[in-house]
Image (cartoon, rainbow, N blue to C red):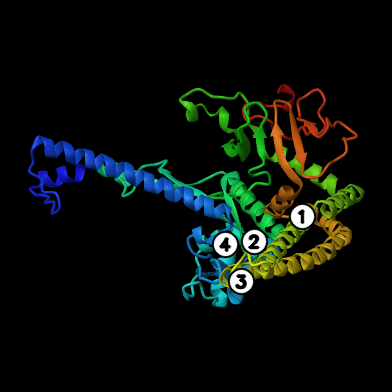
Amino acid sequence: MLLIEELARHGVAVIFIKAPHSGTPEDQLLLQFQGMIAEYERAQILERSRRGKRHRAKQGEVSVLSGAPYGYRYERKSDEQAADYTVIAAEAQVVRQIYELYTVAGLSIGAVTRRLNELGVPTRKGAARWERSTVWAILRNPAYRGMACFGKTQQAARERTNNRTLRQRGGLPARNSANHELPRDQWIEIPVPALIDPDTFALAQERLESNRKHASRRTLEPSILQGLVHCRQCGYALYRTSTRSSARKISYYRCLGADAWRYDGHARCEQRPIRLDLLEHIVWSEIVRLLEDPALIQTELNRRLETARNSSPAKRQQDRVTQDLAQAQKRMDRLLTAYQEDLLSLNELRRRMPALRQREQSLQEELRGLSAQLVDQAAYLRLAETLTAFLGRLRSSAATLDVQDRQRITRLLVKEVVVADDSITIRHSIPTATRPAGGNGGASRLPGSPHAAHADQSYLLRPWRGQPGTV
């Protein structure tokens, strides 16, 4: 109706061949009813289509997915077998190389992209240039660990309807909707051939999340604790800022909640800024103390080795694949029994058996890969025993490391640093014993407090205080 009215305002008449429209009030009413019914039927068709796709996805049919990702070929459904993914060996090798460069070699997504371009690796369409977004999508796609997912996104209204240029012109975006990612527990998993092991995929997701939190963005001067410091009072992060005295520039960590200008003139926190060099000195001293305790490191390694042996994701997946393989073989036996007892025709047997055969072969191949992975994992875990020499070299060079190296080591050993009025709490990634002197279960008193564990009179704690003792 809106389209017809818009055309009529521009002098365009709409002529219906099967149902001539005379323009009377009765015809107008009938046309409006037909439009409402058509809109209702359109919504019903979309809902039935959505429910049908979700049902087929829960049955494990890959036909509901929109094509196959890089590394796979989509095999259409035929009379002999259901739709499925087949592995493209050359592309699968590239996928494994991308994960190895990102998780083992430690390259960034941009560095991985440049490496692929330098090697001249062709893309799916045969182009010689890879984009960062393509590599990022490969690293996030759960299909490569053997579980393609349906229903990962839904279409909803845009969070920002237009940008600054459109707002100035008074315009609107072409589409007022966008795809938004749904929670992980709402995804429907569909088994497909795996290209990488679950541990490697989990490591890639962990690093992607860590990079998202600790991305340097436009950081001009990196700091050791960037992205790790939080306020105990309000829970906001602390950011780096600085002031200038007559002699030098002094840097501080300041709570985001203490900035009144961010919250309509009303600050949400009373936490005062803390000297950057003081806080980093305390935390780095704790890290050096941790590295100087080889028994503590070895105890944690032994604990993680035991945990890895007892609760390996690869071992759990091996058990699941073994159960799926037994079920597939049982279904094949039932089909043969039904055919022998004349309960199933030969044509029906020929139609249903190939899909089960292909499923059995895929599970057997996945099981062989998991068995080899468990052997490699055991060898990898034994390498932890050689870390003592590495820790010795790290302790000897801890005092000469630059800011970037100290930052990387800090992020490996420290989860977060929580700052209060007169103390800080360092939460390590590994369990640590209670400090023998001045510690408060991992909490260090700041200079100026009655129980200062790291008092250093050369440090100014607050920007408006002359001596630490006045805090």
Q: CA distance from mark 1 to mark 3?
A: 28 Å
Going by the numbered disc 1, the residue's amino acid type is: Arg
Q: Earlier in the sequence, mark 2 or mark 1?
A: 2
Going by the numbered disc 3, the residue's amino acid type is: Pro
Mark nearest the camera among 1 and 3 is 3
Q: Secondary structure at mark 4?
A: helix
Going by the numbered disc 4, the residue's amino acid type is: Ile
Q: CA distance from mark 2 to mark 1?
A: 14 Å
Which image quadrant: the N terminus?
Answer: top left
- Kindly tell me whether residue 71 is visible in this rendering: no
Q: Earlier in the sequence, mark 2 or mark 3?
A: 2
Tally of marks = 4
Mark 2 burial class by Cα count in 10 Å: few <14, some 14-19, many 20+:
some
- Kindly tell me whether residue 340 is visible in this rendering: yes
Q: Which mark is residue 138?
A: 4
Q: CA distance from mark 4 to mark 3?
A: 30 Å
Residue 26 image point, x, y percent? 12, 36
Q: Residue at x 33, y 44 (%)?
A: 41
Q: Earlier in the sequence, mark 1 or mark 3?
A: 1
Q: Which mark is residue 316?
A: 1
Residue 97, picture quadrant: bottom right
Viewer-closest of 290 and 25: 25
Q: Residue at x 26, y 39 (%)?
A: 36
Q: Is residue 439 left or right of residue 421?
A: right
Q: Secondary structure at mark 2?
A: loop
Q: Secondary structure at mark 3?
A: helix
Q: Which mark is residue 354?
A: 3
Question: Which residue, given by chain and number where applicable, does mark 2 sit on?
Answer: 146
Residue 408 image point, x, y percent? 70, 52
Residue 394, picture quadrant: bottom right
Q: Earlier in the sequence, mark 4 or mark 1?
A: 4
